[in-house]
Image (tube, rainbow, N blue to C red):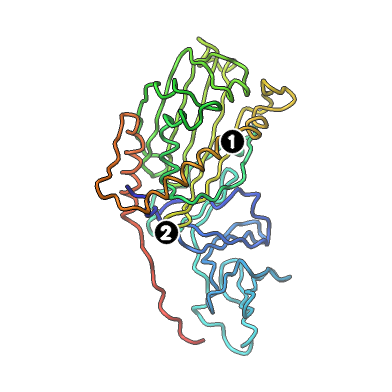
Amino acid sequence: MPCDTFVENAWYVAGRSQEFPVDELQGRKIANRPVLVWRTRDGKVGAFDDRCVHKRMPLSEGRVLADGLLECSYHGFCYDGAGRCQRIPSQLDRPIPTKAKLTPFPSLEQDGLVWVWPGDPAKIGSVQAPRTPEISGEEWETHMFDPLHVPANYMLLIENLMDITHFYPLHEGNIGDIEQSKIPIELVEETLWGTPTVKTIRRVQGYKQPPFMFDWWGVPVVDRWHTHHMVAPGLTRVELRCAPPGKLGQAEHEFGYVIHHSHTPVDPTNHVWRLWVSTRRGKPSASDPSKTCTQRIAETFPAVMDEDLWALERQQRMFEYPDDDYTEVFLRSDQALLRARKILAELEKGNRGKISAPARQAA
């Protein structure tokens, strides 16, 4: 089971666009690499190795000067928005060393998210960052939960999302019940945005809604279409469509949500989990019509996330013990997570591994 590594050559979410104001330097650790994210005064977001070329000082601890240059807080090396050193206070009378430039990470901004590629830029090829139109779409109301730092390998979260038979017993009494575990599972594999993906589809008629979902929408029994889709190593998309019996497929009767889960590895045993829930704009919640469905989900869903976090932490701890004669027993409901493991294991073969940078010559 690949729970001691991660895919380096992939797009990962560094944060939502609004998290990166102009000239506010932010440090991230993505796939075991120090990343500086910086929106310059031209409005563009760039990502660089967060280490000053001189003495490894994190540049995210520096500041942006009046002339728009990023100043390292240790010796004052100054960099422009392209990562080139433009000024060294201690030797203003000498040329800037040609090697005094930051290593960039490929980055892009789309659909309200900032993505970073921490791996080998030459391996990007046809791989694109997944689209998330609901997050920025005007017809959707989206709530972003506070990012969670999870002390577990990101694969454990992906597996959690791909198999909802854990909704009973882990989420019993809020979004889960044992009946969900009985719903047949369809498996779909396809390539999207240059990456192999796996998706589960669960269809059910006459399903009695769990407490939270009745709270949100007020319909006790529904026909339901539910998907969980690992669209990239860094993103899983969940879509839920419900309607009164016999009405599924009729837009005026349907309700539900789209949830995007981003899982950005920090290192082999930690990741950052971000969750965005989107519902159709203007839909009031059943339990409190003064609030929209998105607002009501935002109030109640943290209880679900806390339960998942509780389980992931405990699973990760068990990897501290030798397997000896222990082996996992798999069920039919585990087909999607097993396929996800194989996809990620195949992608991990392209990892650069740790790179030992040669000592720099004195300037």
Q: Residue at the location (29% across, 36% down)?
A: 329
Q: Residue at the location (58% across, 50% down)?
A: 15
User: Mark 2 and mark 1: span between their CA atoms?
Assistant: 35 Å
Identity of the residue furthest to the bottom in this view: 93
Up/down of 20 relative to 305, above or below: below
Residue 82 at what x, y percent from top left? 57, 67
Q: Which of 268 and 251 is in front in this view?
A: 268
In the rendered structure, the answer to whether residue 311 lies left or right of residue 19 reads left
- The disc at residue 85 is none
Q: Is mark 1 on a helix, strand or loop?
A: helix
Q: Nearer the viewer, residue 341 or 198?
A: 341
In the rendered structure, the answer to whether residue 116 lies left or right of residue 216 reads left
Which label's residue is closer to the chain start, 2 or 1?
Answer: 2
Q: How many marks?
A: 2
Q: Which of 274 and 310 is in front in this view?
A: 310
Q: Residue at the location (58% across, 62% down)?
A: 27
Q: What residue type is labelled 1?
A: Ala
Q: Name the residue under label 1.
A: 303
Residue 243 at what x, y percent from top left? 54, 16
- The disc at residue 119 is 2
**Local crowd at mark 1 within 10 Å, few (<14), some, or many (≥20)?**
few
Residue 107 at what x, y percent from top left? 52, 56
Q: Is mark 2 on a helix, strand or loop?
A: loop
Residue 32 at what x, y percent from top left? 45, 61
